[in-house]
Image (cartoon, rainbow, N blue to C red):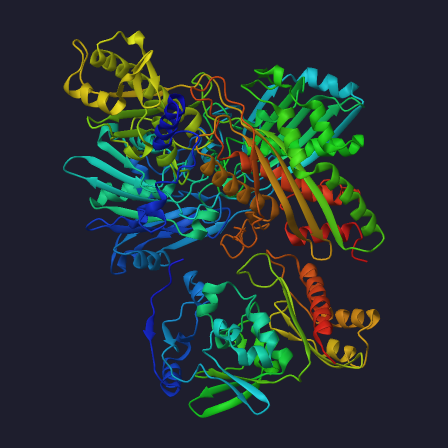
């Protein structure tokens, strides 16, 4: 539990951070809140020779309503997400999700950008971002590019980030007023990653589901956007048969590892149960 | 106000001022602990101090082909790298275990469990030491490993311990197989078999008390400093039994015992993890002797969970025989005990399976037979008593689960079956079929109080309704009511049957009253959080009439403390607490002589009154203990030596037998397997209660660990012998969020043989709690004919039960 030797860098601009990362190459890792990376370093599963700390960069803690989107700077802490009235008003599922990440001490340090960018399938925000249809602004030496959260995750700890790129901002389309939402997470204890978790955002009109988006956490090497399950729900009254079919469709795309949280079959079924419960809460919350 | 009222108020005020036994005195040690001002081993820094770290085996079983330390030694800052080849000439590549086995300090030809110590790197700082461990090149040749203890004694099983392969008789008798450690039998086998052959009803169940770990928050650590000029070794460490460590270090190092100074500073929890001797202690000592500078070793979390002392791993085939009316007439138990790669159990030496023979529990069972086979596997060594007396959690789990299985077979209520079989109050002292003499108990009273408090009858009625609702599909929750009525055996112990490496298991207290009436008292025990500095002072306060705040308790320094066997197995209060009372009474007897001299009366004319001796019939003529202390030094009676101090080494005449009645109400979500504890009620009878607040704290802590063990905490291995989940990411240490709310209660049945009637309580909640939780889970599924459900009861396993029973549609 003693990390290897590394050099610590603390740039003050995105440009210098990007330049540093590019120059130092594969031996360098950006450091946000550190709550995924540092445990890996303590067990020496990860041994970067350089840490590029993003904490001193101005402007990565932006939190704004811009047009029909909210924009969240990557270094915004989970604590700040929880306490933002802007987010709570416009995208309340963010708060619901952040509240089941770790514990208050960790949420003071852990950032939404780090949670999204690290590619750890155990992180909660990635599946939520897929559910919400968010996109990530990736910044490199050549400037910015935009990648959808649904296209960003390639494998465990593998993402669309190119060498030298940093995830700098998250853009989330504001869900329609009156939407229903729910994030359900099964975990063994406070601080644990999900055995399985599901994020659901729906809209209802006259008792009929008019849109549905579903994300699943920690039941595959990447977060999962359960597109088919969502499609099944749309146009239904969320009757039992339709919900069962959607749950089955969601379970079908899972491919969890067997670990101390339980065997794969259990985690798949729990993804289904979490979806069922998140959906029920979303249905109750949907106001139209 | 009349005279009598005044006297009463005066006496009440004087009593309150003492903060003696029975009062909720605040813990004096918390002043430093809550401010972060405790001083632990890792807080110690000595000039020139070096740090050690281990190279550990990635394999569960492998031959060591070669070890090359040259790259590590070349790293700047590395001072030395020790291997078995360096220790062997000193005779230190193996160390004796408390169980009569030997354990490799550094592996010589083979490694026998994953993370076994292979080399010890000593460097200028901890980071360099850790870096260097990656530069030691060890070539292994993997061997087939044994993870399942049931495969240890198969004819074609790989032989694990080649070092003792030809030793057909072990420390506890003949060995049946090279992977066999001992067979231990007790009870009347023939009579038991006869009872079973003719019984109306019998049950037989394999009850597994799975492998887990005590996991104190502070890991094991040591700091050795050898003074080459004086030839003296000072060893600071996380030692629950510092004197035993001193003796062991003397025996294995050849240093004379008076030149070894063992000091246990503040300890951050032990729970049995810090009783044994570990490779890190030996290597830090050897490093310091060889290099002549202090060497520190601090275990990290993964090392702690995966190497130093697991607990449990008992596979108990448990049988009960009963009449059809529900009178238990016999018990038969066979245990397969997985001891890992070395037998490093920390039991009294004559007890290879600890006090497993307390397994007849709280019941009057006329005949019983117990056999335990210990075997080697490719897992970490240990088998320590995790917050319990030796193997008592296992024993209580066996009987308390088995009696529920029997109740179900008989179609009887589990509480009623217990009450029917309880040892009756008038049967104490009670001689159990497996050889113990229970000192005192009143089980019926305790059970009735507990059942009334929890509302047992209405809980069963509610459960019956819920079960019907479940069958009708109206709820997806199952309700379980868990019961445990445990009897512990603690306070080891009498010299006739308890010793550690030949050292009888007495304990000690030395009390010295200063001329101004304040006190220092030193003990042979060592607190790891139990609050000794608070509670021993309360005993002395009551015995000697000196305010507890004027009494300092000191433990852990073997140069100043009298020899003792340490703190584990709930022995501090039963043994050292008794020594404290006896030593105090010796002082009191002398004080009475001095007071008589001061008051110019005969000793027999005096009587004790809270904090003073007064002349019988003349209460205004008295001398307080404070006044007596001054005279003891400055004006003692003729022919009486000055001073006021005493020491007592107390050898207990018997163990003590705390007991309790626990109830748990649990609701289980069948769809996720998540179990929620709705209520947990714990009634404890630990005899005389020294500090009710500390008792309550102990019960809370013990129940929390019991909850952890029953509901998910485990050290698991895969089939390759890889240890799974040896970090707090996976290892279940409940936080305040997961921990249920505890309801505590008590009865008081003093121990008749203990000077103050106290029995010990720190481990009761753990011992009683584990089966109570498991019984609640099992009870929830019992109406579905689920059969016995093994621990740990984490969510996925309970979901699997639901799958097996077809509950998920």
The residue located at (24%, 50%) in the rendering is B45
| x and y, in percent, of residue A123 in the image | 55, 69
Q: Is residue B653 above or below residue B306?
A: above
Front in this rendered view, residue B598 or B27? B598
In this rendering, position of residue B476 left or right of residue B728: right
Q: Is residue B83 visible?
A: no
User: What number of labels is visible?
Assistant: 0
Front in this rendered view, residue B3 or B630? B3
Q: Quadrant of the N terminus of chain B?
A: top left
| x and y, in percent, of residue B63 in the image | 46, 46
Residue closest to the far front: B1
Front in this rendered view, residue B546 or B501? B546
Q: Quadrant of the C terminus of chain B?
A: bottom right
Quarter-of-image position of residue A273: bottom right
Quarter-of-image position of residue A14: bottom left
| x and y, in percent, of residue B13 in the image | 36, 30
| x and y, in percent, of residue B22 in the image | 44, 30
Q: Is residue A63 above or below residue B425?
A: below
Residue closest to the far right: B472
Q: Is residue A153 visible?
A: yes
């Amino acid at each position: 539990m003693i990390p290897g030797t590394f050099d610590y860098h603390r740039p003050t601009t995105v440009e210098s951070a990007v330049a540093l990362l590019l120059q130092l190459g594969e031996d360098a890792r950006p450091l946000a809140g550190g709550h995924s990376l540092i445990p890996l370093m303590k067990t020496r599963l990860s041994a970067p020779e350089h840490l590029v700390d993003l904490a001193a960069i101005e402007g990565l803690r932006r939190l704004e309503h811009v047009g029909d989107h909210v924009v969240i700077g990557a270094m915004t802490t989970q604590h700040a997400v929880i306490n933002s009235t802007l987010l709570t008003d416009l995208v309340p599922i963010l708060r619901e999700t952040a509240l089941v990440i770790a514990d208050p001490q960790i949420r003071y340090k852990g950032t939404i950008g780090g949670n999204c960018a690290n590619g750890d399938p155990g992180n909660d925000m990635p599946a939520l971002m897929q559910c919400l249809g968010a996109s990530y602004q990736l910044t490199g030496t050549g400037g910015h590019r935009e990648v959808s959260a649904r296209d960003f995750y390639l494998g465990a700890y593998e993402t669309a980030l190119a060498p030298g790129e940093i995830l700098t901002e998250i853009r989330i389309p504001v869900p329609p007023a009156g939407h229903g939402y729910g994030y359900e997470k099964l975990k063994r204890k406070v601080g644990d990653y999900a055995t399985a978790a599901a994020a659901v955002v729906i809209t209802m009109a006259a008792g009929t589901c008019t849109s549905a988006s579903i994300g699943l956490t920690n039941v595959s090497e990447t977060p999962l956007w359960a597109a088919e399950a969502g499609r099944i729900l749309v146009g239904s009254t969320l009757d039992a048969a339709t919900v069962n079919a959607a749950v089955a469709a969601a379970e079908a795309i899972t491919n969890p590892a067997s670990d101390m949280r339980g065997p794969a079959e259990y985690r798949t079924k729990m993804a289904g149960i979490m979806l069922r419960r998140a959906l029920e809460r979303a249905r109750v919350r949907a106001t139209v | 106000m009349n005279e009598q009222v005044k006297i009463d108020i005066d006496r009440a005020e004087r009593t309150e001022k003492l903060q003696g036994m029975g009062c909720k005195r605040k813990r004096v040690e918390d002043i430093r602990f809550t401010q972060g001002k405790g001083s632990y081993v890792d807080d110690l820094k000595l000039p020139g101090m070096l740090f050690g770290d281990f190279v550990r085996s990635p394999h569960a079983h492998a031959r060591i082909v070669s070890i090359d330390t040259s790259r590590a030694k070349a790293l700047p800052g590395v001072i030395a790298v020790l291997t078995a080849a360096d220790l062997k000439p000193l005779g230190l590549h193996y160390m004796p275990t408390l169980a009569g086995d030997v354990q490799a300090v550094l592996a010589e030809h083979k490694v026998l469990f994953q993370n076994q110590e292979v080399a010890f790197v000593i460097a200028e700082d901890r980071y360099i030491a850790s870096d260097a461990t990656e530069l030691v090149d060890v070539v292994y040749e993997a061997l087939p490993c044994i993870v399942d203890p049931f495969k240890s004694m198969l004819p074609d099983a790989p032989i694990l311990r080649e070092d003792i392969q030809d030793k057909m008789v072990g420390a506890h008798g003949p060995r049946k197989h090279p992977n066999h450690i001992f067979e231990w039998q007790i009870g009347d086998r023939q009579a038991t078999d006869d009872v079973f052959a003719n019984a109306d009803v019998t049950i037989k169940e394999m009850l597994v008390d799975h492998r887990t770990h005590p996991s104190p928050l502070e890991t094991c650590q040591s700091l050795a400093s050898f003074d080459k000029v004086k030839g003296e070794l000072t060893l600071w460490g996380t030692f629950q039994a510092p004197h035993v460590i001193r003796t062991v270090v003397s025996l294995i190092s050849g240093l004379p015992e008076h030149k070894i100074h063992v000091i246990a500073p503040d300890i951050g929890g032990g729970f049995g993890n810090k009783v044994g001797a570990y490779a890190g202690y030996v290597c830090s000592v050897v490093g310091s002797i060889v290099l002549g500078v202090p060497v520190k070793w601090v275990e990290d979390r993964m090392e702690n969970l995966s190497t130093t002392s697991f607990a449990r791993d008992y596979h108990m085939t448990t049988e009960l025989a009963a009449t059809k009316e529900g009178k238990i007439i016999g018990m038969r138990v066979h245990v397969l005990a997985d001891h890992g790669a070395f037998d490093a159990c920390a039991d009294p030496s004559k007890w290879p399976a600890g006090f497993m023979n307390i397994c007849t529990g709280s019941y009057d069972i006329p005949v019983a037979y117990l056999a335990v086979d210990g075997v080697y596997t490719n897992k970490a060594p240990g088998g320590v008593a995790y917050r319990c007396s030796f193997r008592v959690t296992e024993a209580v789990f066996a009987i308390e689960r088995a009696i529920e299985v029997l109740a179900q077979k008989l179609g009887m209520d589990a509480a009623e079956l217990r009450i029917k079989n309880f040892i009756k109050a008038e049967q104490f002292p009670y001689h159990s079929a497996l050889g113990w003499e229970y000192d005192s108990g009143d089980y019926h009273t305790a059970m009735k109080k507990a059942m009334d408090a929890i509302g047992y009858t209405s809980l069963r009625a509610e459960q019956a309704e819920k079960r019907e609702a479940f069958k009708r599909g109206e709820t997806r929750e199952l309700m379980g009511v868990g019961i445990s009525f445990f009897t512990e055996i603690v306070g080891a112990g009498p010299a006739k049957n308890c010793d550690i490496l030949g050292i009888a298991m007495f304990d000690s207290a030395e009390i010295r009253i200063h001329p101004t009436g304040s006190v220092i008292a030193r003990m042979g025990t060592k607190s790891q959080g139990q609050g000794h500095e608070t509670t021993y002072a309360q005993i002395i306060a009551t015995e000697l009439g000196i305010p507890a705040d004027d009494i300092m308790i000191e433990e852990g320094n073997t140069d100043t403390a009298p020899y003792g066997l340490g703190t584990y197995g709930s022995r501090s209060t039963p043994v050292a607490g008794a020594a404290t009372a006896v030593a105090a009474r010796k002082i009191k007897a002398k004080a009475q002589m001095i007071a008589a001299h001061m008051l110019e009366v005969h000793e027999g004319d005096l009587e004790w009154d809270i904090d003073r001796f007064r002349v019988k019939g003349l209460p205004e003529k008295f001398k307080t203990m404070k006044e007596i202390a001054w005279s003891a030094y400055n004006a003692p009676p003729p022919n009486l030596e000055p001073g006021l101090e005493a020491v007592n080494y107390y050898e207990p005449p018997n163990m003590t037998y705390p007991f309790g009645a626990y109830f748990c109400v649990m609701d289980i979500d069948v769809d996720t397997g998540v179990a929620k504890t709705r209520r947990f009620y714990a009634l404890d009878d630990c005899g005389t209660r020294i500090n009710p607040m500390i008792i309550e704290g102990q019960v809370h802590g013990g129940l929390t660990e019991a909850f952890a063990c029953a509901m998910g905490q485990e050290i698991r291995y895969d089939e390759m012998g890889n240890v799974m989940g040896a970090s707090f990411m996976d290892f279940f240490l409940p936080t305040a969020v997961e921990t249920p709310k505890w309801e505590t209660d008590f009865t008081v049945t003093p121990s008749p043989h203990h000077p103050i009637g106290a029995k010990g309580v720190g481990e009761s909640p753990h011992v009683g709690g584990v089966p109570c939780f498991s019984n609640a889970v099992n009870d929830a599924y019992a109406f579905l004919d689920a059969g016995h459900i093994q621990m740990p009861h984490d969510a996925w396993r309970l979901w699997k039960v639901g799958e097996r029973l077809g509950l998920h549609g």
